[in-house]
Amino acid sequence: METVNIADAARNLSKIVASVESGETVVLARRGKPVATIEPIKNSKIRYGLLEGQLDGLKGVDWHEPMSEDDLALWEG
């Protein structure tokens, strides 16, 4: 788990996102104190439209946007 100063994170966001995409968790710190974490999204395949072809009957759904936490809870049961 890597710890990154917020100012450094702002300058290196694409590197941090790449690290998170590969499974790492990154801790953001302000003045050396941890304040937040960035971690991979669990079940990201469901969030980003894996089921798009199976749910053609749904109207008004933007399959290119993440599902809300409420909608995701319905799918996860």
Image (tube, rainbow, N blue to C red):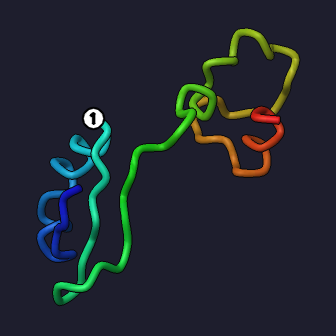
- Relative horizontal placement of residue 40, taking residue 51 as reference (left or right): left
Crowding at label 1, few (<14), some or many (≥20) Cα neighbours within 10 Å? few
Q: Give the residue displayed 53% in from the left and 33% down from the top.
A: 44
Q: Give the residue displayed 20% in from the left and 49% down from the top.
A: 14
Q: Farthest front residue? A: 1
Quarter residue 66 falls in: top right
| Rendering coords of residue 47 (x, y %) | 61, 34
Q: Give the residue displayed 80% in from the left and 16% down from the top.
A: 55
Instruction: Provide the residue designation for mark 1.
Output: 22
Q: Give the residue displayed 15% in from the left and 48% down from the top.
A: 15
- Relative horizontal placement of residue 72, taking residue 25 as reference (left or right): right
Work out which quarter of the rendered image holds the N terminus and state it.
bottom left
Work out which quarter of the rendered image holds the C terminus and state it.
top right
Against 33, residue 71 (above or below) is above
| Rendering coords of residue 26 (x, y %) | 27, 58
Name the foreground residue: 56 vs 48. 48
Q: Farthest bottom residue? A: 31
Against 35, residue 53 (above or below) is above
